[in-house]
Amino acid sequence: MLSQQSAPGFAYIAVPHLAYGNILQELFFAGVNVIKEKPLAINAAEGFTLIEAANKTGVRLGVSAQRRFSKRYNRLREWLPRVGRVSAVHVIEKIVVSDFTEGWRASKNAAGGGVVLDMGYHMLDQLVGLFGREFREVSARLLKTRSGQYDVEDTAHIHISYAGGIEASVVLSRAGAEQEEILEIIGEHAVLRLNGTKVKFLATGSHDAGNDIFNCEESTNDMLKDLFSSFISGADTDLWNTERDLAVMRLIDAIYSEGKLEQLSSTKSIVGDSSDVPAKKWSWPRLTKEIENDVHKQLHTTLSIYNNGGVFGEFETEIKSAISTPDSNLRVLLHNSGTSALHATFYSLGIGRGDEVIVPVYTFHATISPLMQLGVVPVFVDALTGTGNIDPDGVRAAITKKTKAVVITHMWGIPCDMKQLVQICKEAKIRLVEDCAHAHGATLHGQSVGTFGDGAAWSIQGEKVVTGGEGGVSVTPNEEMYYRQLIHGHYNKRCKTEIPKSHPLHAFSLTGAGLKNRAHPLAISIALNQLRLLPSIHSWKSIYASQIIQALSIVPFIRPPQIDAGASPSWYALVFRFDAQAAPKGLTRERYVDELVRRGLDDVDIPGSTKPLYKEPLYVRPWDVLPHVYEPDAYEPQWSNSDFPGADMFYQSAIKIPVWAYEDDRATIEIYSKIMVQVAYEFIDGFLPIVIE
């Protein structure tokens, strides 16, 4: 028993919920000021009782909500007024826990709750601090994603509506494949995004609000040190206002009231049969009134643009703003396709007949086919089985004295290992080109893909994340490469105005190099609309991809993509791998996919055109179609068909689904998740025949 004479002035209490009641009462009675490990309590009523008990004994009670003392979150709060009216907030927080049955957190009796009450307290506290203590509506799904002896949610999907039209989506999980900490705020002037160690302010549209990046490596111990110092000194009284903690508890109460624990460990866990509910058919882009207005406006402005004026200038300026860092000096150029953008980039490298260029064997052929126009010898490198991306070790092994460049593709929107690839190219003194056709909005440690190498190209064709139907864009920090790209396919006005008169290429301004690659203004008017929506599109895609991956994590024969720490994919598509070794005997990828399509998931697909390219005639006998640059006696493939087990494995196991991108797509995501799990377990449990007679 503590006495007031022998008691310390302050105490920090971190014990399971089951144990803290008596300890706190004794400390309060002894006059000890207490910092309690979050949460304040297991519900608002209990929290109010604790606060009253502390007040009656004249002691101070605080909760260790250490992110209130985080430099990153404080910078986010500082920049928040600059975004203008906030419309949407997206939160993803995940940690990696291998065994949910270990320790006191496995028991609701001991812990008081699951991921919402425990790990989620910090993010919910930030939402209360940023957007106020009152909310209009809450909905939630609380999931137990694994079998085992634990009775609390390990994953939660939460939607919170605030006054003023702010809609917040929150994903919390202890079942993550990697640790993530993301808070994104979408405003009328900018997007404010905290992702790991970085806080980014990204102006959108035509708003001249500037871009800023704040990077801060801070540990939990750093934040706790500041927290303890503040509490002991009596400073920062607004951060120790227990009314804020009560508001957090009221929000948690609402989440637990609206969400009931769902067990997702067998077919019995799937609530109802969604097979009679139609999933939304994939269609991209979403044709809105805004797109129609933009096209109509452009139609009555001009159908041809010869320089970088009008919608061309707007698009080039805004994509540069979206991907640049403050110290970068990127040059951006629109083209009529992503293939043309790559062709211009390869041409600008100055490579040609007999030069070797290392390329991914697993990609869409347009990554490589423009090289063949230049007489280059492609050197294929195998793929990593976790993503389909090029293997850096294979790149290093493939370099010879004839190697002039490395080309990589961020497959399906998942960033490659750029740290290794940049270092390899730097050591070998060779060029690096990124094919970002799938990767609009993808980043690696906060840096946009397409900004790591000497040049990059995006497609804005078809169903790309940013699309105009047809089009492409190239980016380079290299002035000489930019001038050569202009000469390649943008003759006359752009060359005359952008290439200095003193430069040797200026003399070719009228004719260029003989090609015309200009984009179409109507296509770019659509693409500009999509580019301005990209922060929101990327955020929703990230949330939905995470939800589907989480839902399918209980299926033993479905493997998710392996995302490197610090990588934020674009989610152009979500590609799982079918693990035949873990599937019921005899079950094939094709049988599983056929059943999914039969249940109404029409957009589940086995990719065909994106494939290992080592057998394609263009690369085996190019002289048949390009006799002016290749001769049979002078060209020999640099590979054998057995050199690419990783690419073959990935291709033969891939199952692709689209990733929807709007808030009203939530029901479709749930339908896909439920049916994909349900069908899997119907095969596992023997309810579905492996072979159809």
Image (tube, rainbow, N blue to C red):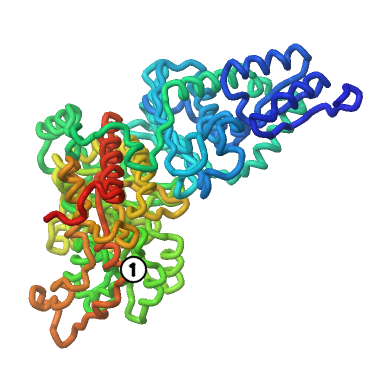
- Asked if 270 appears above or below 50 in the picture, the reply is below
Res. 243 image quadrant:
top right
State left or right for residue 52 relative to residue 471.
right
Residue that badge 1 annotates: 406
Q: Secondary structure at mark 1?
A: strand
- Asked if 299 appears above or below 509 in the picture, the reply is above
Q: Position of residue 128 (x, y in %)?
A: 52, 23
Q: Position of residue 300 (x, y in %)?
A: 10, 31
- The amino acid at mark 1 is Val
In the image shown, does 190 or 510 lie closer to the viewer?
Answer: 190
In the image shown, does 627 or 254 lie closer to the viewer?
Answer: 254
Q: Residue at x 77, y 30 (%)?
A: 11
Res. 289 image quadrant:
top left
Can residue 455 be seen here?
Answer: no
State left or right for residue 651 relative to residue 5.
left
Mark 1 crowd level (few <14, some 14–19, many ≥20, 10 Å Cα): many
- Asked if 85 appears above or below 577 in the picture, the reply is above
Res. 455 image quadrant:
bottom left
Q: Position of residue 296 (x, y in %)?
A: 12, 30
Quarter of the image containing the N terminus? top right
Q: Residue at x 17, y 59 (%)?
A: 608
In the image shown, does 617 or 61 lie closer to the viewer?
Answer: 61
State left or right for residue 14 relative to residue 155.
right
Q: Residue at x 48, y 28 (%)?
A: 80
Q: Which residue in the rendered view is the most extreme toward the front?
A: 686
Q: Residue at x 83, y 27 (%)?
A: 9
- Asked if 427 appears above or below 472 in the picture, the reply is below
Q: Position of residue 67 (x, y in %)?
A: 59, 33
Q: Which residue in the rendered view is the most extreme toward the bottom?
A: 633
State left or right for residue 375 relative to residue 78.
left
Can residue 82 be seen here?
Answer: yes
Quarter of the image containing the C terminus? bottom left
